[in-house]
């Protein structure tokens, strides 16, 4: 049996809140295999974002463990976690989170700085990823000069530039109109078909229907986990 | 924009420190120049003033021409002697007059003090022998009495006694506001005859003696020999104070270096306070910057930046800000020094070392004051930083 890409073991995340304790994640154990396209759904406060931050090694569990590619993360220090995020995980955010006053090319090259890649190679690899996203003619544009969809594709190029094991997207279409959302979801499906593992957090069922597996969260617990019943495949 | 305003704080600090260093070394250069204009290797011998060491000693301590000659003949390494009498005089020519100091000298004065007659000649041995009424004027006196006119051969009245101008001294300029050209030289013998002094002098007495010392000879050793000779001549017993004071240019230099060094240190210490204030400004702006860019910090951490990467980014930013500020301050200081130098007769040198030091020091200020904000930035939790709006 192959090692799952992501494996959570009795994952718990608690917050102190007004004298009581809130269980944002309450004992979640699941695994995600290579090549899956997973949509994590739930209402706000259901714990879906917290779960995502936990498997992205951005947040530290109160108890339980997250294993990435077979490696336990609970014992890692902040530097080791940073290196893990850099090499194995690509993040896509709702608000794109591009650096302002910085060109698309330089934005995409940022993760490679922290991977210790030399400048010439950084720019070459960033250029290649942007071209693959169809942004070859926008290399020198700053984010302010790009549309929302273009900004999100720059962000996806940035997430992919280190050739990570999986892509974590937190409401990637939350700031986009429906047509652009469709385009982005099509891009994700294409990337998934090319072998990329994608984990997507959304509260919109239509967006979630683009994935192949759906995990529903409520009150910090998984209430449903299975294949998407009627998958939407975008065919241009 | 805000950053630029803040770097001005560092600019002003660096400006103040660099100027303080420059003024300090300017003072040093100036005083050293004054000492060098006396003559580079020499000792000055003069009797202990009356009010020191009691009257009895001073009574015996009347430096005479015979002492001078004995020093020249018996002390090794003495190249020339310049015995002198000083008097404040009024020199009149035509309708103009000048108050100056007349110094009675021998030809040795030229050798010991590097004085050169620019036109005409210096005081000669024959002048001294015959107590000739000849006078060599300093540039300032010439300008006061004659303007641009060449006074060679003219007669001037010094305290109502007519003297013939036989030479004009090459200008030496001024140091620390003291004009080295405001003087007139006459034969020592003529001075003794013609100018009354505030204190009765014997026929052979000197007010002061400059002793020129050969290059390469230890000034300290020569000083000790002169001191011993004078003690022997005046039969000063061991343990008793000598009636003479001997100072060498070397001692002047050392004292000057110490005094101006303290002066400089005090100035720099005061100026450093403004640099400290500038540094606190940098710390403030960096804290604001860290707060404003919390989301960017979170993003960079998500993309794989280690804590040290974030810390270094902000450290470099603070250092660069400070270095820009330092460079501006340095340029301001150079401009101010040039302006000051043009206005006042006082050198304000800014050396290459000072310049490089100022820039490096600004960088250090940046690292020191940027340190805390940078560490704060690096300690942020990635998820909390990302969540910040």
Image (tube, rainbow, N blue to C red):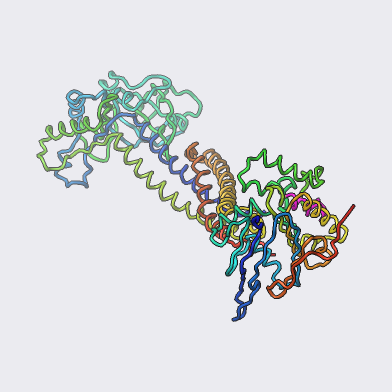
Find residue B377 and report its horizontal and vertical position in percent. Answer: 58, 58
- Residue A152 colored in magenta in the image: yes
Apparent side of residue B92 relative to residue B324 in the rendered image (left or right): left
* Residue span colored magenta: A145-157
Q: Estimate the x, y position of residue B369 in percent, counting from the top left.
A: 52, 55
| Residue B96 belongs to the span the image colors magenta | no
Q: Would you say A206 lies left or right of A23 here?
A: right
Q: Quadrant of residue A124?
A: top right
Q: Residue furthest bottom?
A: A19
Residue B84 falls left or right of residue A2: left
Question: Would you say residue B154 is visible in this rendering?
Answer: yes
Horizontal side of B212 relative to A21 (left or right) equals: left
Residue A104 % position (x, y): 75, 47
What residue is rendered at 47% in x and 23% in y?
A: B150
Given residues A39 and B220, the one toward you in this image is A39
Residue B196 falls in which quadrant of the image? Answer: top left
Place of residue B356 in the rendered image (x, y in percent of width and height, measured from the top left): 51, 40
Which residue lies most toward the front here?
A1
**Front in this rendered view, residue B50 or A205:** A205
Residue B285, above or below B59: below
Placement of the N terminus of chain A among the 4 image quadrants: bottom right
In the image, what residue occupies the spot 37% across and 31% down? B37
Task: Determine if residue B159 is in view.
Answer: no
Q: Nearer the viewer, residue B365 or A200?
A: A200
Dominant secondary structure (helix, strand or loop) of the stretch shown in magenta: helix
Question: Up-down: is A18 above or below B119?
Answer: below
Q: How many marks?
A: 0
The relative height of residue B157 versus residue A27 in the rendered view (above or below) is above
């Amino acid at each position: 049996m192959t090692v799952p890409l992501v494996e959570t073991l009795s994952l718990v995340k608690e917050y102190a809140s007004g004298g009581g304790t809130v269980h944002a994640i309450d004992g979640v154990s699941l695994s995600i295999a290579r090549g899956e396209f997973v949509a994590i759904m739930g209402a706000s406060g259901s714990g879906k974002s917290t779960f995502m931050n936990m498997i992205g090694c951005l947040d530290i569990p109160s108890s339980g463990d997250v294993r990435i590619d077979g490696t336990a993360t609970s014992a890692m220090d902040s530097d080791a976690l940073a290196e893990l995020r850099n090499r194995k995980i690509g993040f896509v955010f709702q608000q794109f989170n591009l650096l302002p006053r910085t060109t698309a090319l330089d934005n995409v090259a940022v993760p490679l700085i922290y991977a210790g890649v030399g400048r010439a190679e950084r720019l070459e690899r960033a250029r290649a990823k942007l071209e693959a996203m169809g942004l070859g003619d926008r290399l020198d544009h700053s984010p302010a000069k790009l549309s929302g969809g273009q900004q999100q594709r720059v962000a996806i190029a940035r997430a992919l530039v280190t050739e990570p094991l999986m892509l974590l997207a937190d409401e990637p279409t939350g700031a986009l109109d429906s047509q652009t959302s469709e385009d982005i979801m099509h891009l994700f499906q294409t990337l998934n078909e090319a072998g990329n593992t994608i984990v997507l957090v959304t509260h919109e069922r239509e967006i979630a229907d683009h994935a192949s597996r759906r995990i529903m969260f409520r009150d910090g617990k998984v209430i449903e986990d299975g294949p998407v019943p009627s998958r939407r495949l975008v065919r241009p | 924009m805000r950053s630029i305003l803040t770097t001005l704080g560092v600019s002003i600090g660096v400006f103040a420190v660099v100027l303080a260093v420059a003024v300090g070394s300017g003072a040093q250069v100036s005083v050293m120049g004054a000492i060098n204009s006396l003559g580079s290797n020499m000792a000055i011998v003069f009797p202990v003033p009356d009010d020191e060491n009691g009257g009895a000693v001073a009574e015996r301590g009347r430096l005479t021409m015979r002492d001078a000659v004995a020093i020249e003949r018996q002390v090794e390494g003495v190249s020339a002697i310049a015995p002198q009498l000083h008097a404040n005089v009024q020199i009149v020519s035509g309708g103009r007059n000048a108050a100056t100091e007349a110094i009675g000298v021998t030809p040795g004065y030229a050798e010991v003090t590097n004085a050169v007659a620019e036109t005409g000649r210096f005081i000669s041995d024959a002048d001294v022998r015959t107590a000739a009424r000849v006078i060599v004027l300093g540039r300032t006196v010439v300008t006061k009495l004659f303007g641009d006119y060449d006074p060679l051969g003219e007669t001037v009245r010094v305290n109502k006694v007519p003297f013939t101008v036989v030479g004009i001294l090459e200008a030496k300029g001024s140091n620390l506001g003291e004009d080295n050209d405001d003087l007139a030289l006459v034969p020592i013998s003529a001075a003794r005859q013609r100018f009354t002094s505030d204190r009765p002098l014997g026929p052979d007495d000197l007010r002061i003696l400059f002793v020129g010392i050969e290059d390469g000879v230890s000034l300290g050793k020569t000083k000790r020999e002169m001191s011993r000779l004078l003690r022997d001549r005046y039969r000063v017993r061991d343990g008793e104070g000598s009636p003479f004071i001997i100072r060498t240019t070397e001692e002047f230099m050392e004292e000057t270096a110490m005094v101006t060094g303290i002066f400089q240190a005090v100035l720099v210490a005061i100026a450093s306070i403004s640099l400290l204030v500038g540094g606190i400004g940098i710390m403030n702006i960096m804290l604001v910057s860290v707060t404003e860019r919390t989301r960017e910090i979170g993003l960079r951490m998500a993309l794989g930046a280690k804590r040290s990467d974030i810390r270094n980014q902000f450290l470099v930013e603070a250092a660069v800000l400070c270095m820009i500020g330092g460079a501006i301050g340095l340029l301001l200081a150079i401009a101010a020094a040039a302006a000051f130098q043009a206005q006042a007769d006082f050198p304000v040198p800014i050396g290459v070392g000072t310049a490089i030091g100022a820039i490096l020091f600004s960088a250090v200020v940046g690292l020191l004051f940027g340190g805390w904000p940078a560490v704060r930035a690096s300690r942020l939790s990635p998820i909390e930083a990302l969540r910040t709006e």
